[in-house]
Image: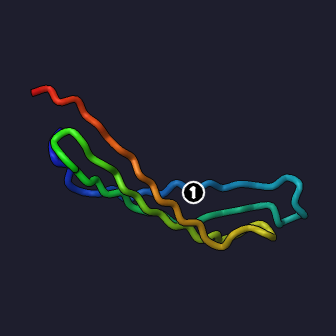
Amino acid sequence: MESIPGFSISTSPQITYDWKAESGNGWTIPIGGGFTQAVPFSSTKAMLVGLSAYKFAQQAEFGPEWQVNLTLAFMFAEDRS
């Protein structure tokens, strides 16, 4: 595996609806996004580190105002030399 420079920008909101909530109070609508950076450790190992944040434009009565996600993904490649 070669060195992996760069990063990516993404958004992946999860819009939900509570069917049992009072009228007009069931939607949870997040708005936001984040980024992911590749961090190489050696010629065969790397890690993806991502951070994203979402502000809820509309939330259920007892729902959160913000959501923050941290993502770690480890990559291991075969050394074919």
The local crowd at label 1, few if under 14, some if 14 to 19, many if 20 or more residues have their Cα within 10 Å, is: some
Q: Position of residue 77 (x, y in %)?
A: 25, 34
**Which residue is farthest top?**
80
From the viewer's perspective, tell me whether residue 75 is left or right of residue 64: left
Decide which of 49, 19 is in the foreground and name it.
49
Identity of the residue drawn at 71% across and 62% down = 28
Q: Position of residue 21 (x, y in %)?
A: 87, 60
Name the image quarter holding residue 78: top left
Name the image quarter holding residue 9: bottom left
Q: Which residue is mark 1?
A: 13
Decide which of 75, 51 is in the foreground and name it.
75
| Helix, strand or loop at mark 1 | loop
Query: Mark 1 is on which residue type?
Result: Pro
Q: Quadrant of the N terminus?
A: top left
Q: Position of residue 79 (x, y in %)?
A: 17, 30
The colour scheme is rainbow
Q: Position of residue 71 (x, y in %)?
A: 45, 54
